[in-house]
Amino acid sequence: MFFKKSAKMLVLVVLVIALSGFTYAFAAANIVPPSFAGDGSGTISGYTVSLIHYNLNTTTPTTIDSVTFTLSAAATIARIQLNTTWYPCTITGGTSVSCTTTGALVSSATSLQVVAAN
């Protein structure tokens, strides 16, 4: 009886060791490409927005078709928020920005928020 328990225990130990070896071999075969991580801080300087122009619809001048403006430094992405709606923008030459706002009402245009990043 002691021999049967010992034999079962030996088989179990051998099985666990074999599975551990397979798991290690599988994990050792994984190749992870090099990557970078870091932590730091820097000043966020922001942009100066100038030459803001609201382009009204020619047929219905109570709506704003687009908003154009100039940034003080080059950006690669920009969005504007006119009241509570966000609109996409197109940047030309790094600093000239045009945002299509078709349907925005002049009467409800009380705030403009510009978000830009390089």
Image: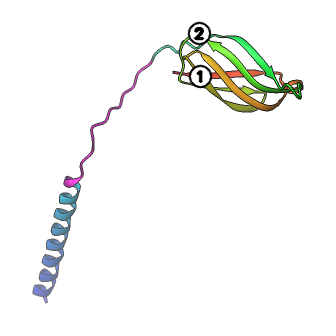
Q: Is residue 38 magenta?
A: yes
| Left or right: 75 as drawn, with respect to 51 | left
Residue 5 in the image, given as x and y percentages of width and height:
16, 83
Secondary structure at numbered mark 1: strand
Residue 41 as seen in the image, left or right of residue 1? right
Q: Quadrant of the N terminus?
A: bottom left
Write down the residue under mark 2: 72
Residue at figure coordinates x 31%, y 36% from the top left: 35
Q: Amino acid at mark 1?
A: Ile
> Quick one: label 1, few (<14), some, or many (20+) residues within 10 Å?
some
Q: Where is residue 28 drawn, in percent x and y? A: 19, 53
- Viewer-proximal residue among 33 and 63: 63
Picture quadrant where residue 102 is located: top right
Instruction: Name, please, the residue furthest toward the front.
Output: 59
The percent coordinates of residue 18 (x first, y second) are 15, 68
34 falls in the magenta region: yes
Q: Secondary structure at mark 2?
A: loop
| Residue 49 image-quadrant placement | top right
Report the predominant secondary structure element of the magenta stretch.
loop
Marker disc for residue 22:
none
| Magenta residue span | 28-41
Instruction: Confirm or deny contact between disc 1 and disc 2 (CB under 8 A).
Output: no
Spatial separation of the CA atoms under disc 1 and disc 2: 13 Å
- The residue under label 2 is which amino acid type? Ser
Toward the viewer: 7 or 21? 21
Quarter of the image holding residue 100? top right
Q: Residue at x 69, y 26 (%)?
A: 99
Identify the residue under disc 1: 91
Mark 2 Cα shell of 10 Å, populated few (<14), some (14-19), many (≥20): few
1 or 2: tag closer to the N-terminus: 2
Q: Is residue 85 left or right of residue 10?
A: right
Q: Residue furthest bottom?
A: 1
